[in-house]
Amino acid sequence: MPLTPAKCTNCGAALELDPSKDAAVCPYCHTPFVVEKAINNYMGGGDSADAIIAQGDNWLNSFGDTAQAFLCYRQATEKFPLDYRGWRGLLMVELRVTMVLQDDKVEERRPAVSMYSRQALALAPASEKPAIQKARRDYFQRLYQVLEKERDSIQRELEDTERQAAITNSKSLRWQLPELREKLQEAQFRLEFIGQEL
Ligand SMILES: [Zn+2]
């Protein structure tokens, strides 16, 4: 059963619940509640955009809880899709998450970062755009560094293989060269592509 967004009826924490269950316990305030009521609390909750975004900012900036912040900002974008602050919040969560991600996971976040920053930039007042652009650029800078490292390691592998092939005159090593050159070219191409986003 896919999880449904909900909101704790006691403390207001954003939650993801299995709607086929009758009851659950809030992992934050440890209060038991009726699942249906918590889902209704999310859907029909009368919270203003200001209140939801303030909750998200609090989770992100005071507690560093990116999962809770994500759920609040997502609720903001669902209920108030024209308010740029929800999209900006989702972008900030992505940025925070990406900074501690393993190198090989950074590129997977690109579609989300692109979408959140596009929405936020389209809706934000001019005075807020520079900060959003900076967050977006920070992500692409991290991605650029990851791809640069990858390119350099392929380059080294190619040079080593060329050297070994020349010394040993090994046929099997020489056969690896075209494939490595192709890999290098591809890595260079990806790097230049991302470089245009900086
Ligand atoms: Zn709670």
Image (cartoon, rainbow, N blue to C red):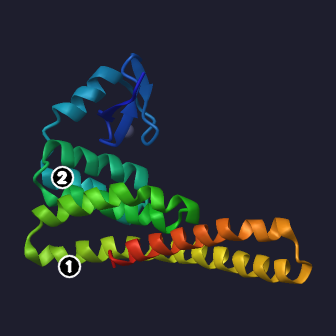
Badge 1 density bin: few <14, some 14–19, many ≥20, Cα 10 Å: few
**Looking at the picture, how far across and down is residue 124, in whole percent?**
12, 66
Whole-number angstrom distance, CA of label 2 to CA of label 1: 24 Å
Q: To which residue does mark 2 refer?
A: 51
Name above or below for residue 65 compared with residue 34. Answer: below
Residue 49 screen position, x and y as percent: 14, 51
Where does the N terminus fall, quadrant-wise? top left
Q: Secondary structure at mark 1?
A: helix
- Where residue 44 appears, as percent x and y from the top left, is 15, 31
Mark drawn on residue 130 = 1
Q: Earlier in the sequence, mark 2 or mark 1?
A: 2
**Up/down of 45 relative to 61, above or below:** above
Instruction: Look at the picture and state if 24 lies above or below 87.
Output: above
Name the kind of residue labelled 2 in the image: Ala
Type of amino acid at the residue the image marks with label 1? Pro
Q: Quadrant of residue 92?
A: bottom left
Q: Quadrant of ligand 1?
A: top left
Image check: 87 left or right of 14?
A: left
